[in-house]
Image: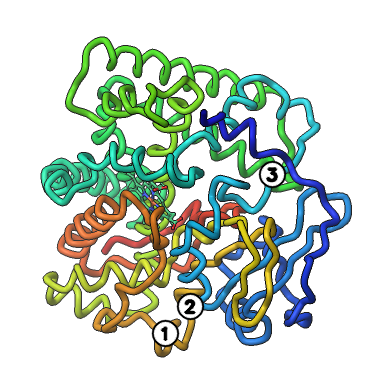
Amino acid sequence: MLKPLSETIRPEKGGYKPAYGIKYPNKPGGFDLSDMVQFKQGQPYDYFHKLRKAAPVSWWELPEGVEMAGYWSLTRYEDVKACDSDAKRFSSQKGGILMGYMEDENFVSNLRPVKRLSAASLNSMINLDQPFHIPLRMEHRPFFTPDFVKKLRGSVEAEVDRLLDKMEAIAKTQNGYVDMVPHFSERLPLFTVCEMLGVDQKDRPKIVRWMHYLELAGYILADPESSVSPLFVGKFLWNVRQMFRFGEKILQERRDNPRDDLLTLIANAKLDGKPMEQNYLDGSWLLIVFAGNDTTRNSLSGTMKLLTQFPDQKRMLTEDPALMPKMTPEALRLVSPVMYMRRTALEDAEFSEQKIAKGEKIVMWYGAANRDPEIFADPDRMDIHRNNAADHLAFGTGPHVCLGQRIAIMQLEAAYARILARFPKIRWTGRVNHAPSNFVHAISSLTVKLH
Ligand code: HEM
C-alpha cells in the first residue's frame, strides 16, 4: 500500500560526499544556487552561462551547519532533458521535487498547521512515481483537454478585461503608472484555477488571502534578514488552519453533491485503487492552486519585461496579433517561471561524463537549459520567429510534464492579445522586485506605464 510521502521522505543529513570523483571541480564563483536570497536579483542567467561552460554538471554542498545533502546541478539542455524524460531511473518519489528537506527545529515548523502544510506539499502526484503517478494524472485529464481550455477561454478573456479596467483606473490616479503584479499578474491565474476547481465566487477572496499568507510566510522564512512578528505568526497559523478546514469541507460537499468541476473530480479520485485519504486530498487540491498560480503569474509579468526589452518584437506583435502563438513559447523559454525540479537517481548514471551514484540528488535548472546556446542560437535574445522555441523545457518534459501547460498558454495569449490591443504603448519602467526563491522565478512587483 502507498504510504503518505510525507512519512517516507525524511529530512536529510548534511556532510554527504559524492561517491564518484568530481569531473568539473572548478565551478565559477560569484553565485550560490542554494541561497534563495541571492535570487532576489532574478535568475542568474550570466552565471548559468559560465557554469554550463565550466562545469555543466556541478557538485553543490550546503554550508556547514545546514543539515541538507549536497546535490548535482545540471545546466546543459541535453542533460536536463535526458534526466527529466527518464522517470524510471530518476525518481520524484524517492526524495521529492525540492532541492532538499531539512529537519526544522524551530517552534513554528513544529506547529500542527505548519506540519500539515509541509505534508500537503509532498502528498500529491507531482511527487509520485509509477505505478501511482500516471493513473492519478489520467484522472485529472478532463480538465486539461483542448476542448476544456477552449471553453474556459471566454471567461478568462472577460476577467482580463475586468482587470485591465481596474488597472487603468488605478493608473489614472498615479500618473499612468501601476504595479502590474498585484493588479493583474497575481489575479488572473487565481481566477482561472478557481474557475477550474469550481470555487464559488463568495469563497474566492479567501483563496486570495491564503495564498498571500503562504507566500509571505515562505519568503519571510527564506530571508534571514526579515523578522517575523508574533502577530504575523498567529495570523498565518489561523489562515492555514482555515484553508485546510475549507478544503476538507468543500471536498466532502462535492462527494455528497457532485458538480461538473475539478474539486468533484479530486474528491472522488482513486489512488492505488482506493479513494484518496485526507493527506492526499489536502495535497491534491493544493497542488492545482500552487502549480497554476505563481508559475503563470511570473510568466505574465516576465513577458511584459521582455516585450519592453525587445521593442522590435513588441512592435511585430502589436502590428500582427496573429503572431501571439509564436510569442508564447519564446517568452516561456526566456522567463522559465519554474527554475528547477529535483530528482533522485535510482541507479548509477552519467551526464556530460560525470558519474552520479544511486541515491544522489540531481537538480535540473530549466532557466539554464532554456538558454543553452547549443540548442538556441543567440539564446538571450527574444525572437518570436525562432523556429525551435517550442522545444523549451519551461514546462519540463517526460511523464510529469506540466499538466496545466495548455491553461497557462491560453492565459498568456488571452492576456497579451488584450493588453497590446488596448495599451499598445505599455512599457515596463525598469522597476522590478523578486522575492527570495530559487524554486519559482518570483516577480513580486513590476511597475508599468500604460500609455
Ligand atoms: C507558465 C506557467 C507554468 C509553468 C512554467 C509550469 C511548469 C511546470 C513544471 C516545470 C512542472 C514539472 C514538470 C516536470 O517535472 O517535468 C509542472 C508540473 C505540473 N503543473 Fe505546471 N506550470 C505552469 C502552469 C500550470 C497551471 C496553470 C496548472 C494548473 C492549472 C499547472 C499544473 C501542473 C501540475 C498538476 C503538475 C504536475 C504534473 C505531474 O506531476 O504529472 N501548471 N508545471
Label 3 Cα crowd, 10 Å radius (few <14 / some 14-19 / many 20+) = some
Percent from the top left, x then y, of residue 394?
41, 64
The furthest residue to the right: 64
Q: SS at mark 2?
A: helix
Q: Are marks 2 and 1 in contact (CB under 8 Å)?
A: yes
Label 2 to label 3: alpha-carbon separation:
27 Å
How crowded pointer 2 is (Cα within 10 Å; few <14, some 14-19, many 20+) is rated as some
6 sits left or right of 206 in the view: right
Q: Evaluate whether residue 179 shows in this view.
A: no
Q: Secondary structure at mark 1?
A: loop
Question: Viewer-proximal residue, 57 or 205?
Answer: 57
Query: What type is the residue that disc 1 sits on?
Result: Ile
**Disc 1 residue crowd, few under 14, some 14–19, many 20+, Cα 10 Å:** some
Mark whose residue sits in front, 2 or 3: 2
- Quick check: can you spot residue 102? yes
Q: Earlier in the sequence, mark 2 or mark 1?
A: 2
- The residue wearing badge 1 is 375
Residue 401, located in which quarter of the rendered image? bottom left
